[in-house]
Amino acid sequence: MMARSVDGEQNDFSPYKIIQKKRDGEELSSQEITWFIKNYTNEVIPDYQMSALLMAIYLKGMSSKETAALTDAMLYSGKVLDFKDKKVIDKHSTGGIGDKTSFILAPIAAACGVKVPMIAGRGLGHTGGTVDKIESIANFRTALPLEDFSRLLSTVGVVLIGQTADIAPADKKIYALRDVTATVESIPLITASIMSKKLAEGTSGIMMDIKVGSGAFMKTLPRARALARSIQETTLRFKKNITTMITDMSQPLGNAIGNSLEIIESIETLKGKGPRDLTDLSLQLAGGMVYLAGLAKSHKEGVKKAQTALTSGAALSKFKEMIAAQGGDSSVVDDYKKFPVAKCITKVEARTDGYVAAIDGVELGLHCVDLGAGRKQASDKVDYSTGIIIAKKLGERVKKGDLLAEIYHHQEQQMVVKKIKKAILTTTFKFSKNHSKKAAKLIIEVQTKWSKK
Ligand code: URA
């Protein structure tokens, strides 16, 4: 059977045969992959056939050759920028609970001379989205045309926008489908999804934060390492430099979860008053970006420069400059009352003595979705004002009556708050009587790979 194709080319490909081939564990050719992605993006191949292929990839995996072809097909489904500037470096995280490092490391790195182009996503499922969080600052514009994006990158040095239809449109469509077909946690699919967006941004290097643990897509270290290798191979093939950092996500990063609450915690961190884990990780990531940009001789020296930018206040000034340049009110930095923050705060207190043995980050994320801080469906509006601040972290000692968490909510949300409070005391936090489970090391492994140009 001759297959119909978006540009009318005739060939022997058929969606059915390609799905069948992958289902049976065979390797797809680059032409088959390119043809499938092109025709799906252009709405010739329907969602149900793409879903079947995604599940076959999820179950049977892909070789590095197939992953490369998939990344290429998704990358070239849209515009590919190239700033031809060694100092243009972006960072990406595979996603976690309370992960707000972008708001801290981007102004730090920019204050050190790195150019940081961030094209970020919105939240879906249990993880929050960078774009939703920054939009809790009134009038902050994340829908900028690519021309403004490039202009602000060279004048301010840091710019944060949402996904545009121009960059990797195939990923936008495929990611939404993966989210509802249980096919997110696949190494080739994550590699192609992340890299098609990052490579299109025109950076010369990428700082990749790969999360591992209960709150992350990669639950085990071997899986996180495999994803790191796959991302390294893809980046080097495109002649770009990369640092992969495998970091712990067995508990939320920092204490705040929820849009305004996370931006306030990020500003506190930029003022030098943030939680230790969030500060340390942001400095390590920013320092890695300084190193990749060629502005430091080693990662260690990059971290030193990042620390200076933080303590001198240069990073905080850069954050204000970015807000103003994108239409937002930068005085929020000095007046948190200007953030939408829910008025009702329900405290959750420990009922027994013990030690924090586990914190279920996915559950915390889902509680925030129930409070309206995240989306159940892509079309939902996000409530910037609600969320949860946790007061205890892994391994900490807890006495009966100690504060465990604060729930920020509206008056009319009493039912959902009751449910969340009960869950926090029974399933979200787990306690042990006699021993203290130490939190895992925050930064587990770091590798930098330079491309041979
Ligand atoms: N982040 C992405 O952009 N894509 C994935 O597939 C997973 C995390």
Image: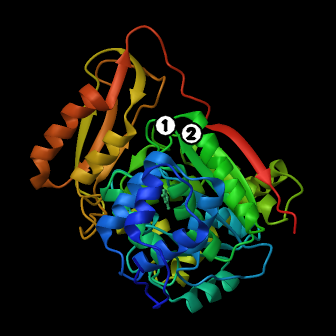
Q: Residue at x 37, y 76 (%)?
A: 138
Q: How many marks?
A: 2
Residue behind label 2 places its C-beta within 8 angstroms of ligand 1: no
Which of the pair 83/169 is nearer the observer?
Answer: 169
Q: Is residue 42 left or right of residue 160?
A: left
Report the disc number at residue 219: 1
For label 2, the residue is 223
Determine the image quadrant of residue 384: bottom left
Instruction: Look at the image and tell me in which quarter the N terminus lies.
Output: bottom left
Determine the image quadrant of residue 296: bottom right
Q: How far separated are the C-alphas under marks 1 and 2? A: 7 Å
Q: Are marks 1 and 2 in contact (CB under 8 Å)?
A: yes
Which of the pair 311/372 is nearer the observer?
Answer: 372
User: x and y percent of residue 47 in the render?
Assistant: 31, 69
Indicate whether 171 appears above or below 277: below
Indicate whether 90 appears above or below 277: below
Indicate whether 34 appears above or below 265: below
Q: Can residue 337 be seen?
A: no
Q: Can residue 367 be seen?
A: yes
User: x and y percent of residue 337 in the render?
Assistant: 35, 64
Give, as a three-letter code, the residue at label 2.
Arg
